[in-house]
Image: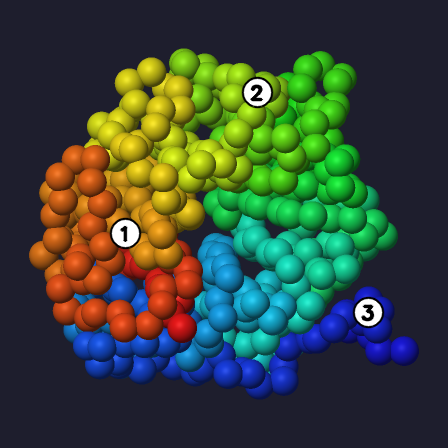
Amino acid sequence: MSKIIGVDTANIDSIAGLGTGGGGGGITPVPSTTNSGILLCPTNAGLKDPYSAGELSSYSNPVHMYQISNLTGVVKICQGSYFWGVLLSNGNLYVGGSANASYLGVDSTTATNLVNNGGLALSLSGVSKFTSIGNGIFAIKTNGELWWAGSTNGLLDNTGTGQGTTSSFYGWTRVGSDSDWYDIDAYPQYPVQAIAIKGSAGSRYLYACGPNTNYGTGQGTNSGSILSWTRVKSAASTDLSESFSKISISYASCLAVTDGGKLFSWGENQYGLLGSGNTTDKPYATQVGADEDWTNCWACRFGGFALKSNSTLYMSTSWSAWRIEPSTSSQFTQIGNDQNYQDIALFNTTSSSMNYAVFAKKAGSWYVSANSVSAGSWAGSSYWSGSSEGSWTAINDALTENDITGTIDYVFPFYSVSNNNEPQVMFAVS
C-alpha cells in the first residue's frame, strides 16, 4: 500500500512530481499578438509572492505581457499566500509558488524546482472545483470528495480534515468520508474563512469553517472559531434550510444563490455590499429582497454583484470609486440595461485602491471598467484606455501594447504582487 507522510494515497488520482505536464517553466516574452496560454499583464512587476525566485528573472519591460504558462483549457485560477493554482477543464490542478513549497501538495523535489525556477506542476487530477486559502488548497473531486493540502493552523482541526491529528498536512488528504461536496469558496487572506455547498440535489446546504470574525461563518457570533465544517444558520440554533447552487466569499462577506433563485447574504457589511440597505453586519444568512430570479453572485469587500436569469447585472455598493452606475442605497441596483452579462472578475483584497477596477464578460467577450480614478492610476498610461462612468472598455481596446488574438477563457486579477502595490492581471487564452 502506497504511503505519503503516513497517509494512504491509494485513492488519490495523481500526485505531483511527475514533471510540469505542459505547465511551462520560467517566463517567456510573447509577441504583440498573442493567442494562447496564461498571459501576465504586469505593471512594474517585482519578485514578490506568489511568483518564484526565478519566475520573473528575465522580466525587464513593464509594458509587454509575458506567457507564464502554455496551459490552455483554464476554468479557474486562484491565489494563496505564497502560491497560485490553475484548474483545467480536464480536471488537472496545477500549482506554482514562491515559498512554503510544502503547502503546494507536491513532493519536495518538485516544490523546490517551482520555488527556484518558476512554472507550474501537476498537483492533483480528477478535480471539479478548488479554492486557495491562507497556506493551503481545498479541492472537490469529480466524485464529490473533498481534499485538502496545507497548514491546518487556525482553520480546521482533526474532525475537519479527517486526519486524526491537529498537525499540519502538506500532501493531499481527504476531508472526512462524505462524497456529496458540491462547491467551495474561500477568502485567501485574513480572516481565513471558507464556505461550501454540500448535499444532494434539492438539499444542498451551506457550510462554513474558520474564525467567526465579522460574522463571516454565519454562526451568529463574531468571536472564536469553528474548526470543523458547520451548517450556516438563519437564526440562533437554526440551520439554514434552503438548497443552494452558487456561493461567493470576500473579507468575511458572503453571498449565495439558492436553487430557486433567491439571493442570501451575511457577514461583514461596512460598505453595504450585502444589499440589505444599510452598512450593518449580518450575523446570520438572510434573503436579500424578495426576488427569486438570481442565478449567480460575486462578493468583494467594496462591492457585491449579482446576475439575474435574464442576464442583467446588479451591484450593491454605492462607493463612487467603482465608477460604474453606482447604487446609492446599499441595495442591489441594475447596472445599465444590457442583458448579455455572463461573468465578473474582481480584485479581491482587503484594502487597496486596486479593488475598484471591475472586469465583466458580456456576450462572450471580456471588458474592463477603466477610468482615470479606478484604473488610470495603475495602468492607464501603459495598458488601459480611459472610459466614462457607467461604461465598459473591451480588453483589446484597452490594451495599448498587446492585442489578444485568441479567446479569453478566464480573467484573474492578482492582489498585491508587484512593486508599489500595483496589481497584475492574468488572462487565460485559448
Q: Please state if 28 lies on the left or on the right of 255 as rendered.
A: left
Q: Position of residue 319 (x, y in %)?
A: 27, 26
Label drawn at residue 11: 3
The foreground one among 54 and 62 is: 62
Q: Please state if 305 lies on the left or on the right of 214 as rendered.
A: left
Q: Relative to residue 301, is residue 236 depicted above or below?
A: above
Front of the two marks 1 and 3: 1
Real-space Cα separation, disc 1 to disc 3, in angstroms? 42 Å
Q: Could you tell which of marks 2 and 1 lies nearer the N-terminus?
A: 2
Front of the two marks 3 and 2: 2
Q: Which amino acid does label 1 sit on?
A: Tyr
Label drawn at residue 367: 1
Query: Which residue is at a point 68% across and 15% down the rendered structure image?
Result: 235
Q: Position of residue 12 (x, y in %)?
A: 76, 70
Q: Could you tell which of marks 1 and 3 lies nearer the N-terminus?
A: 3
Q: Position of residue 363 (x, y in %)?
A: 36, 52
Query: Which residue is at a point 55% across and 83% down the rendered structure image?
Result: 21
The foreground one among 45 and 245 is: 245
Residue 282 visible in the picture: no
Q: Could you tell which of marks 3 and 2 lies nearer the N-terminus?
A: 3
Residue furthest left in the image: 381
The foreground one among 66 and 307 is: 307
The foreground one among 12 and 154 is: 12
Query: Which residue is at a point 26% across and 49% down the rendered structure image?
Result: 368
